């Protein structure tokens, strides 16, 4: 039997947020004096460019991006994240994005953030949007501290398909159970999952996704 509710999936960076939380976290750590700007900033810029161009090496990127988590106690990182939320993330939280999430929640839809960014960075952000469920890349934790490694499949490109299928399977469901499934994203990196939902929506999309969405007659919206 099909579930009565519909499914609403949201990308996070440059979709619900007016910016990239992963990229901004690195800049925040540099500003806090916890990362060497000269060593980190140039590589961060290159990875971000690779992501936008669709040729990001996710393994190398995660090795780079998660290393700082292994260099500081989790307690300190959690304290820093509170400051990060106040100073950096909340100003990025778009009013139209919050209204969109609220609309789906009011309709009784099952709402979920699905992002390539790691869950340390993104869990408090999803919570700030009032979204209970999150799929993100999982940083490995051993004895209560981050190792700098990854646990499971990174939720990037085809990995988002793998992860949403796993998540639904754990709940005795599959994507085809939902009569209507939405996925809001800005990035052509999310095309593998966008092609599987019934209602893909391009949000302030990059040039490649804009062209693809136009060709497919997908809805295109702006939350800016």
Image: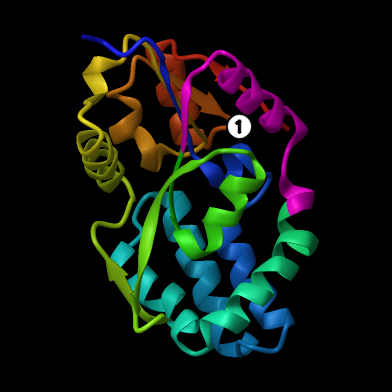
Relative to 224, is 127 on the left or the right?
Answer: left
User: Regarding mark 1 in the picture, which secondary structure is present there?
Assistant: loop
Residue drawn 34% across and 33% down? 191
- Counting from the top left corner in percent of width and height, residue 222 is at 66, 26
- Counting from the top left corner in percent of width and height, residue 176 is at 22, 18
- Counting from the top left corner in percent of width and height, residue 19 is at 65, 50
Residue drawn 54% across and 33% down? 205
Q: Main secondary structure of the magenta part?
A: helix
Q: Which residue is mark 1?
A: 204
Query: Coloring scheme of the render?
Result: rainbow
| Residue 106 included in the magenta stretch of the image | yes
Residue drawn 24% across and 61% down? 152
Q: Quadrant of the C terminus?
A: top right
| Residue 132 included in the magenta stretch of the image | no
- Counting from the top left corner in percent of width and height, residue 88 is at 74, 60
Q: Quadrant of the N terminus?
A: top left
In the image, residue 184 above or below residue 217: below
Residue in front for this viewpoint, 9 or 18: 9
Image quadrant assignment for residue 31? bottom right
Image quadrant assignment for residue 199? top left
Span shown in magenta: 90-112
In the image, residue 112 above or below residue 27: above
């Amino acid at each position: 039997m099909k579930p009565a509710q519909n499914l609403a999936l949201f990308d996070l960076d440059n979709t619900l947020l007016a910016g990239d939380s992963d990229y901004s976290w690195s800049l925040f750590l540099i500003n806090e004096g916890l990362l060497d700007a000269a060593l980190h900033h140039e590589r961060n810029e290159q990875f971000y460019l690779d992501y936008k161009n669709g040729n990001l090496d996710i393994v190398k990127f995660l090795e780079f991006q998660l290393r700082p988590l292994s260099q500081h106690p989790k307690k300190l990182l959690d304290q820093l994240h509170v400051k990060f939320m106040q100073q950096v993330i909340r100003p990025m939280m778009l009013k139209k994005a919050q209204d969109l999430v609220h609309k789906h929640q009011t309709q009784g839809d099952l709402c979920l953030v699905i992002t390539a960014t790691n869950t340390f960075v993104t869990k408090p952000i999803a919570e700030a949007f009032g979204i209970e469920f999150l799929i993100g890349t999982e940083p490995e934790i051993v004895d209560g501290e981050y190792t700098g490694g990854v646990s499971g499949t990174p939720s990037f490109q085809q990995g988002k398909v793998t992860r949403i299928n796993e998540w639904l399977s754990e709940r005795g469901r599959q994507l085809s159970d939902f009569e209507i499934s939405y996925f809001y994203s800005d990035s052509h990196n999310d095309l593998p999952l966008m092609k599987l939902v019934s209602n893909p929506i391009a949000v302030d999309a990059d040039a490649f996704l804009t062209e693809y969405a136009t060709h497919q007659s997908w809805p295109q919206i702006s939350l800016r």
